[in-house]
Amino acid sequence: MAREVRAGLSRNPRAISPKYFYDAIGSDLFDAICELPDYYVTRSERALLEEHADSIVGLAGARALVEIGSGMARKTSLLTKALCDRNASPIYIPFDIAPEAIDASARALLDLHPRLRVRGVVGDFGRDFGRLAVHAPPADGTRLFAFLGSTIGNLDEEAAPALLRSVADIMVPADRFLLGIDLVKNSRILNAAYNDSQGVTAAFNKNVLRVLSRELDGEIDEAAFEHLAFYNEPLQRIEMHLVSTRAQPLTLRAADVRIDLGGGERILTEISRKFTRASAERTLIGGGMELLEWIPDAQGMFALCVAKKA
């Protein structure tokens, strides 16, 4: 963490990885974001899964579900229900950076599906896929890998295919990959989704300062930062920034960081890319995968992709 944060804050423009949003407070705030009227992402994806989860699991012939970046597994129960309905010994393997989220989601799913076996794997999907190869072996039967919530959009045009290649490397030909993606749409809808009137998204964004200060022995005046989120139309992505409202130092002793921020200077905390079918397919091809099914919703808000190893 110290190494990554130091490198990100040394770049121009400065940046912090969005994975550091998700301590206990950040996870609760994101849960609240998912319930906001203007944040359509979770509802749109859930509606698609309610309609298609059973057929996706059935066509994949999956006995095991491997969820990458599982978080609180908000929509996973739809896939695990289909898995349990079709298998005597279903297996769920959540892979996430936050052990608390894995534990909480596993307990909730086991209450719903007592026959389910859960093997939580803690790791960073940027570098720890080797752990999945150990804990989710092909010997468990055909696997459905899932990467939901349009989390793929948090990765740029180079990092997204690289991540998919890491997944493809541990897949066998019979496995399937389920990807949830947010679609390009009217900028008014996108800007409203990341700038809620209740200030929940702003609190979520600023919480990363609290995480850094706590974990890296920092001195940060959180009140001297403002939330900024907007749709960058040429790049087809939302950008979320923290804006320094005045000239100020930012110190993280455990990361050997002391920088002077100017008034109005931005720190990029997240991108959220939006896709078309063509750009989604390019990303899959770049990641060594082949698109099998394209499942958009009727409103053009969100889509599910089913792919296989190329």
Image (cartoon, rainbow, N blue to C red):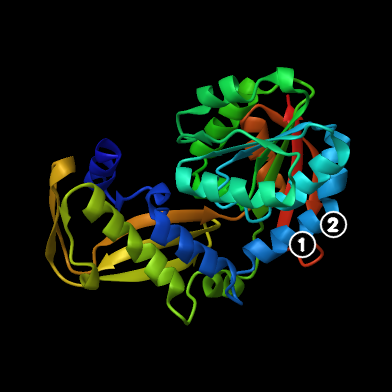
**Quadrant into which the N terminus falls:** top left
Indicate the position of residue 280 as horizontal and vertical percent values. Answer: 67, 44
Q: Residue at x 68, y 54 (%)?
A: 75
How dense is the environment of label 2, judged by Cα within 10 Å: few (below 14), some, or many (20 and up)? few
Picture quadrant of residue 174: top right
Residue bearing the label numbered 1: 47
Q: Is residue 114 left or right of residue 261?
A: right
Q: Secondary structure at mark 1?
A: helix
Residue that mark 2 sits on: 51
Residue 159 percent location from the top left of the image: 49, 37
**Distance from label 1 to label 2 (Cα)?**
6 Å
Q: Residues within 10 Å of mark 1 (few under 14, many from 20)?
A: some
Please give left or right for residue 99 compared with residue 84 in the image.
left
**Vertical comparison of 180 with 128: above or below:** below
Q: Is residue 98 visible?
A: no
Seen at 37% across and 55% down, the residue is 269
Q: Residue 93 falls in which quadrant of the image? A: top right
Query: What secondary structure is found at the residue carrying circle 2?
Result: helix
Give me the disc on residue 14.
none
In the rendered image, the quadrant that contains the C terminus is: top right
Where residue 127 appears, as percent x and y from the top left, is 45, 29
> What residue appears at the point 64 percent right and 60 percent down from the top-left corner?
184
Residue 269 in the figure: left or right of residue 60 = left
* 101 shown above or below 310: below
**Residue 21 appears in the picture as rendered:** yes
Q: What is the three-letter code of the residue carrying label 2?
A: Glu
Give residue 101's position: percent from left, percent from top: 51, 49
Asked if marks 1 and 2 touch (Cβ < 8 Å), the reply is: yes
Residue located farthest toward the bottom when viewing the structure as drawn: 197
Q: Nearer the viewer, residue 220 or 72?
A: 72
Q: Nearer the viewer, residue 51 or 79?
A: 79
Residue type beneath disc 1: Ala
